[in-house]
Amino acid sequence: HCVAPACSPSRNALLFGVEPFHSGLYPFYTLDKIPAKVLEPYTSLPRFFKEHGYGSFGAGKIHHGSKAKPGEWTEYHQPKNNKLIYNAEGGYVQGNSRKMAFCPTTNPLAEHPDYKTASYGIEVLKRKHDKPFFLAVGIVKPHLAFVCPQRFFDLYPDPITPPPIKTDDLSDVPWAGRAMAKLNDDYRYRTNEAWERVHRSYLACISWADFNVGRVLDALAASPHADNTIVVLWSDHGYHQGEKRSFRKFSLWEEATRVPLIIWDPRAGKAPASHECKQAVSLINIYRTLAELSGLKAPKYVDGESLVPQLKDPAAKVKGPAITTWGRGNYSIRSDDWR
């Protein structure tokens, strides 16, 4: 489960290893807008590894809105942007909005930002490195706008089966909770009969993300670093697709807080067995987990706990529930059985 159901506070929490209710970093902040004295006590993950002798390489969306902070990166990739051409007739576009678009693009694959980000990761993996390295590859999709190449839309034939949605699911929710639902989106998509096109676009963008993640993993497998590289795949938050009549994130319900989290450590000398830990865990645990796996000591202030025991035994008990914060004073507590 994410630390916060929005990209900026979720990424600040994960990358600095501190819960929003300890840092005060609740809403959307780009790093250059945060006073230096607020961040002074904290060491970001890329800076942590860089200060311990690692090369630190990044591309794409790592921090929200700030691509390069002094002291963090040995190298940060900032490619030239290409304007994406939308095939609006192949999907749905809300007015003339570039952001609220749900349709295929017609550009070559290599002109898309996520393709460029993955290509940079591939290039770093092909290099010879004289010291260990930390590589952050920030794939943006599926993020608004839900646009990607046509071939990924073609993976999903008509009709798209919508997620299971209880029609009266807000009837027993108190007003403080109902305020989280994005009813305007739901009303608009119902009125325009657009929900199916929105769902298809979301699925297509997920497959586009999978494609680019796969490119990076294929490059890792072909590299000399394949047997000595820890891989973590995570998403900063979940996403509503009409559940509780809501669209997007920004809620404390399961759809917005539940995220993928895969940790792969091949250093045992053979392909590791795949195990699923079904307990509720938080992304706040990534910082301490990577520090321990790398034989390093995390800074004292870092919240969360290492998930190394769960990597060894998925049934090993996690000490506490997953806490998600959405603004000061608003929290969900997720245990194995309860929210």
Image (cartoon, rainbow, N blue to C red):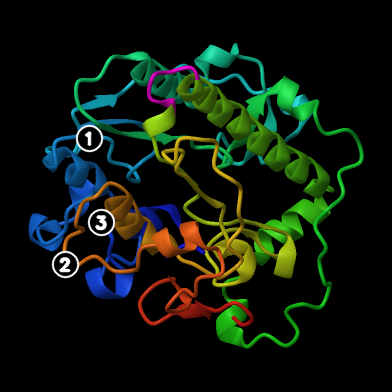
Q: Earlier in the sequence, mark 2 or mark 3?
A: 3
The percent coordinates of residue 168 (x first, y second) are: 81, 78
Q: Earlier in the sequence, mark 2 or mark 1?
A: 1
Looking at numbered disc 1 in the image, what kind of residue is underneath it? Ala
State the CA–CA distance, disc 1 to disc 3: 15 Å
CB under 8 Å between discs 2 and 1: no
Whether residue 294 is visible here, answered yes or no, is yes
Q: Earlier in the sequence, mark 1 or mark 3?
A: 3
Taking the magenta stretch, the answer to whether it contains residue 115 is no
Residue at image position (25%, 74%) is 22
Q: In the image, which disc is placed on residue 316?
A: none
CB under 8 Å between discs 2 and 3: no
- Per the image, the residue denoted by label 2 is 300
Which residues make up the magenta segment?
A: 222-226
Residue at image position (54%, 22%) is 218
Horizontal side of 196 relative to 311 (left or right) equals right
Looking at numbered disc 3 in the image, what kind of residue is underneath it? Phe
Element at badge 3?
A: helix
Q: In the image, which disc is placed on residue 68?
A: 1
Horizontal side of 9 relative to 291 (left or right) equals right
Rendered position, 23 above or below 102: below
Rendered position, 260 above or below 338: above
Horizontal side of 302 relative to 334 (left or right) equals left
Rendered position, 334 above or below 288: below
Element at badge 2?
A: loop
State the CA–CA distance, disc 2 to disc 3: 12 Å
Q: Nearer the viewer, residue 14 or 52?
A: 52
- Per the image, the residue denoted by label 3 is 16
Looking at numbered disc 2 in the image, what kind of residue is underneath it? Lys
State the CA–CA distance, disc 2 to disc 1: 25 Å
